[in-house]
């Protein structure tokens, strides 16, 4: 049988009627006292208790211990341990459990003197001698907590519960450690189980009330304080918070865990939110919504396989949970399991034919599958259902440009920018398309907006300079291209346009210098282009590898491919190496573009 006493460790100032700090406002001031467990020991071991140094030392040590003379008890228990090892007659032979108990009492004697390091050492000795002595593991947890080693304390309390699942003190202490670590969901679970183990204990009810109070749930907190007052009137400290109401089962209400998880997510504590959902599912495995939210967290952390398992479990419990089916489709796409993604999203679309978000996702997957005409139809359906969503129009424009419908893509991207004027990616792509079609004033306007948002982006600076050059803003062209070649001296087309612009303003020396540099770099590029097919293949493989490693999202890869396609089909003078330098010297830098338009 075990019994407990409070350590003499001074507790922090009482909370009185002051509410504890809410989450995020710092460490919560909790009463710091935990019980140290003693044992009703040595029943059946009277054979060594009389007529031996061991028996005399242990008996004297126990009398000193029970009288609170811990310095004396330390010395006597040490003598008992020495005698147990030195004396070898039959009367002084003891079992491992009995030797472990002497270490435990020696540790307790240190603990009541606040000598926690020495106490911890003795508790460790006790568990090494007898690993199944639950009280030794528990007291070791108390020592760890006193030394502010909360994670080690949690582990020790768990060991104690492994060997004695009914040990109330360990369950309650585990809740206290979780509470102080900020793992409020597991703290609440531990307090709940502690209440089940000892219904007449006020402590776990009181600390459940503190958890509710910390989250602003004053009604639930008051119920807990009222119940604690009924169970153990002398324990209650928060009497002013008590209301005249019966205690309900608020601690089992799933909404508490959802609110807790929401607050943790708002603070950026995703791991804590995940623990809250896991704790709720341990208590109520049929909480489908908690499993769905947990899967969403897994997906945000790119743990796609685990997310897929949980989404499937949600759909098994509730086949009509179409949001889970939609997220499952997105998870499949993230793993490039495109056919599974497609079939999953088609099922969603059948369930919810008026949800534009589903058709947006379906269009993206169809684009990945190379089904451009079908993806255009999906995006058009999404645009019909979500006319004010800029991403839908932007995605529609991407699909249209990939299929060669430039005019329609232009209209879609213009609509996306009307809905979100600061969308740099849409303006950039629109600028490329304007440049390709020879609409230089509009291209300049688009790139100006992007350049203001991203003044260090050299590609934007380059294309803006090309547009300026074509509309005669030559000084600004020189300024931008000089910046480009300073940072990227290997950018041979920037040298070409810079040289041509210098020649147009009458600066022959600088103009010819950059034209010669263009010719030199172009020669190097021609040699490299002999293996261009292999280089393109290698580049594609590198992009795919980055995508698999999570360094490049499918959307970013798709955007890169579309922009490359636009650039490849621009007029040669803008980006290709086929432009002869003699045309620059003669001032003839505008060649007709290659149109892929179908309309």
Image (tube, rainbow, N blue to C red):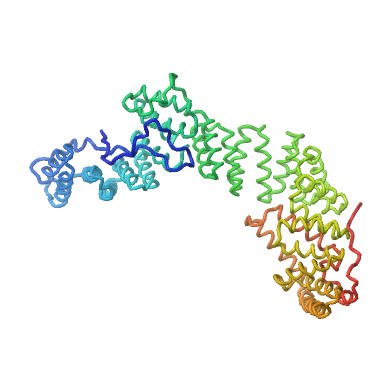
Report which quarter residue 169 is drawn in: top left
Report which quarter residue 436 is drawn in: bottom right
Q: Quadrant of the N terminus?
A: top left
Between residues 142 and 81, which one lies in front from this camera angle? Answer: 142
Give the side of residue 158 with respect to residue 544, left or right. Answer: left
Q: Residue furthest left?
A: 51
Residue 556 position (above or below residue 308):
below
Between residues 540 and 577, which one lies in front from this camera angle? Answer: 577
Q: Residue at x 33, y 44 (%)?
A: 141
Is there any visible trace of residue 96 in the rendered image? no
Residue 153 position (above or below residue 19):
below
Give the side of residue 157 with respect to residue 87, left or right. Answer: right
Residue 404: percent from the left, percent from the top?
Answer: 86, 54
Residue 288: percent from the left, percent from the top?
Answer: 58, 33
Q: Residue at x 38, y 41 (%)?
A: 158
Residue 239: percent from the left, percent from the top?
Answer: 38, 25
Between residues 492 and 273, which one lies in front from this camera angle? Answer: 492
């Amino acid at each position: 049988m075990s019994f407990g006493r409070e350590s003499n460790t001074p507790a922090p100032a009482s909370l009185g009627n002051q509410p504890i700090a809410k989450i995020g406002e710092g460490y919560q001031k909790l009463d710091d006292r935990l019980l140290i467990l003693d044992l009703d020991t040595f029943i059946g071991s009277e054979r060594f208790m009389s007529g031996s140094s061991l028996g005399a030392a242990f008996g004297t040590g126990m009398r000193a211990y029970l009288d609170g003379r811990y310095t004396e008890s330390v010395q006597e228990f040490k003598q008992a341990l020495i005698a147990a090892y030195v004396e070898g007659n039959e009367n002084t032979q003891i079992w491992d459990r009995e030797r472990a108990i002497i270490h435990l009492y020696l540790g307790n004697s240190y603990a009541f003197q606040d000598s926690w390091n020495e106490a911890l050492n003795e508790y460790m000795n006790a568990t090494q001698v007898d690993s199944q002595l639950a009280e030794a593991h528990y007291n070791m947890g108390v020592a760890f907590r006193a030394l502010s080693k909360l994670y080690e304390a949690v582990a020790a309390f768990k060991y104690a519960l492994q060997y004695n699942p009914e040990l109330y003190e360990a369950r309650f202490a585990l809740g206290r450690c979780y509470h102080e670590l900020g793992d409020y969901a597991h703290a609440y679970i531990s307090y709940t189980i502690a209440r089940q183990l000892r219904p007449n204990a006020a402590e776990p009810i009181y600390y459940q009330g503190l958890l509710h109070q910390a989250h602003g749930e004053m009604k639930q907190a008051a119920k807990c304080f009222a119940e604690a007052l009924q169970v153990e009137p002398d324990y209650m400290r928060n009497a002013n918070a008590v209301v005249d109401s019966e205690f309900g089962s608020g601690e089992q209400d799933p909404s508490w865990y959802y609110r807790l998880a929401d607050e943790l997510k708002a603070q950026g504590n995703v791991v804590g939110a995940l623990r809250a959902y896991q704790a709720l599912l341990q208590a109520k495995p049929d909480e489908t919504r908690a499993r769905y939210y947990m899967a969403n967290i897994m997906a945000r952390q790119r743990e796609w396989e685990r997310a897929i398992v949980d989404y499937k479990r949600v759909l098994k419990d509730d086949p009509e949970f179409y949001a889970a089916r939609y997220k499952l489709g997105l998870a499949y796409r993230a793993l490039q399991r495109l056919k599974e993604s497609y079939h999953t999203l088609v099922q969603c679309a059948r369930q919810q034919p008026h949800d534009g978000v589903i058709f947006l996702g379906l269009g993206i997957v169809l684009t990945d599958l190379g089904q451009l005409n079908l993806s255009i139809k999906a995006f058009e359906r999404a645009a019909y259902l979500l006319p004010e969503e800029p991403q839908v129009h932007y995605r529609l424009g991407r699909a249209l440009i990939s299929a060669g419908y430039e005019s329609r893509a232009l209209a879609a991207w213009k609509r996306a920018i009307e809905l979100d004027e600061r969308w740099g990616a849409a303006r950039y792509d629109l600028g490329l398309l304007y440049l390709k079609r020879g609409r230089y004033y509009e291209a300049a306007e688009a790139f100006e907006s992007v350049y203001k948002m991203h003044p260090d982006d050299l590609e934007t600076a380059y294309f803006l300079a090309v547009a300026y050059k074509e509309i005669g803003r030559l000084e600004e062209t020189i300024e931008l291209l000089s910046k480009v070649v300073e940072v990227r001296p290997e950018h041979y087309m920037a040298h070409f346009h810079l040289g041509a612009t210098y020649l147009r303003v009458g600066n022959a020396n600088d103009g010819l210098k950059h034209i010669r540099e263009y010719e030199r770099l172009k020669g190097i590029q021609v040699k490299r282009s002999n293996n261009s097919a292999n280089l393109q293949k290698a580049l594609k493989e590198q992009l795919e590898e980055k995508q698999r490693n999570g360094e490049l999202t499918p959307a970013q890869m798709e955007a890169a491919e579309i922009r490359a396609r636009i650039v490849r089909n621009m007029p040669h003078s803008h980006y290709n190496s086929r432009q002869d330098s003699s045309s620059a010297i003669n001032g003839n830098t505008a060649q007709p573009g290659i149109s892929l338009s179908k309309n």
